[in-house]
Image (tube, helix red, strand yellow):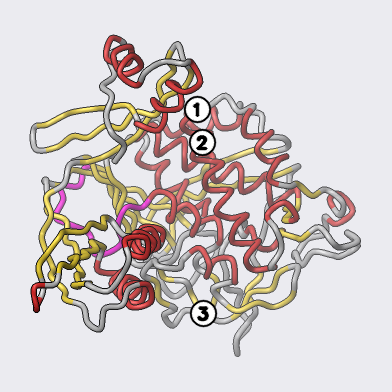
Amino acid sequence: MKTLYLDCGMGAAGDMLAAALLELHPDAAGFVSRLNQLGIPGVTAAAETVVKQGIAGTHLTIRVHGEEEESLDVPHDHDHDHGHTHDDAHDHAHTHDHDHNHGHTHDHDHAHHHDHDHMGLGAIENVVSRLAVPEPVKQDVMAVYRLIADAESDAHKKPVAEVHFHEVGAMDAIADITAVCWLVHELAPEQILASPVHTGSGHVRCAHGVLPVPAPATAYLLKGIPSYSGDIRGELCTPTGAALLRHFVKRFGSQPVMRVDTIGYGMGKKDFERLNCVRASLGQTEESTDQVVELSCNLDDMTPEAVAFAMDQLFEAGALEVYTQSIGMKKNRPGILLTCMCRSEQRDTMIRQLFRHTTTLGLRENVSDRYVLRRSESIVQTEYGPVRVKQASGWGIERQKAEYEDLARIARSHGLSLDEVSKNMMQSGLKAGKGE
């Protein structure tokens, strides 16, 4: 299986992830040229080889109207500067109920250019929609940016519609995110894995004042993702980096057994006592098992409606699967065996949900190895419009089928039976099936 593994032992920032992936690309210079030709307003990108602690890597510089974003970490008992480079989205996210007369805490003055230039998510989507990149890349870019907007919304306790990004920070992040999404699209790994994320520690100075590391938006984006603070003072993981990891990474943990073909080093701008980089490894892993936790309980005093509601809550909390079986219990009472499948890191969440939404007084746990096919999804244009198609492969098997919900929507809107739509899909080379 073609696997991309990201070592986030020194955190993750958009520019560092992009630079690491750029080193894996067979035509890095050509890619940077194409990135500059996309027409992101005011943006120029430049990649240069830098050497840190004797190791050569790539630093990607994004400038907006000739300016580069900076992260200002608060010094701690010593003079030298700490920090990451320029893609810190929280420095420039604002809710919409202010007078726009605030300043910006940068080490160079650009307030006279951009004090009033703020962009909402709609304006950002308008910029992204015009980029000359494949449609899946645009979809990934907006999915990542929505994650950032959701995080800022939570941090400020304001609706997403009221979250606005400073124009320089927004364009900078669009460039970083687009570069990463486009590189992932062209490198085409079948799965992306990453190490636990080093967030750094201490405080960072931004437009809202001095905030703890990880900043609130970053902390929100890293919920459920293995992370640690370590002993380095400074912001190592930025909101953009955290959002990209959340969107793309399938699993966090140690690097699996893999035959590595290429390695890329994406260098940060600042220097630390450790090599400040994201290391990306691209290679092949063997088909492997996936471990899951099965939590189950016996129920004989809940209504069918209450059981259905409990199942819905477990799915919303992220369960992989929830199902019931009819059983006979003591005193010949009919009952229900409720089973919830989840990943090990979700165990505590699912236990709380089961106790909260069922009447059980105890749960059983079984840890199982699961053999799975690799899954992906694409959008295919048909005579009825776009249809999502799910692909599965591995263990010598390849199959695809159209998303049931899309087929049902087409059947309703065109007055057709589901069978008629399914046959048309099959004639188009797509196999219809029930959604998974």
How crowded pointer 3 is (Cα within 10 Å; few <14, some 14-19, many 20+) is rated as many
The magenta span reads: 249-261
Identity of the residue drawn at 43% across and 55% down? 245
Q: How far from the left and from the top, in percent, is residue 177? A: 54, 45
The local secondary structure at tag 1 comes to helix
Q: Nearer the viewer, mark 1 or mark 3?
A: 1
Amino acid type of the residue tagged 1 in the rendering = Glu
Marks 1 and 2 close (CB-CB < 8 Å): yes
> Which one is in front, 359 or 378?
359
Amino acid type of the residue tagged 2 in the rendering = Gln
Specify whether residue 54 is in view: no
| Relative to 164, residue 123 above or below | above
Task: Give the residue at mark 3.
Answer: 201
Task: Give the residue at mark 2.
Answer: 139
Q: Is residue 250 magenta?
A: yes
Q: How far from the left and from the top, in percent, is residue 87? A: 60, 55
Q: Is residue 245 magenta?
A: no
The local secondary structure at tag 2 comes to helix
Task: Give the residue at mark 1.
Answer: 135
> Of label 3 and label 2, which has the lower sequence position?
2
| Relative to 105, residue 79 above or below | below
> Which one is in front, 110 or 56?
110
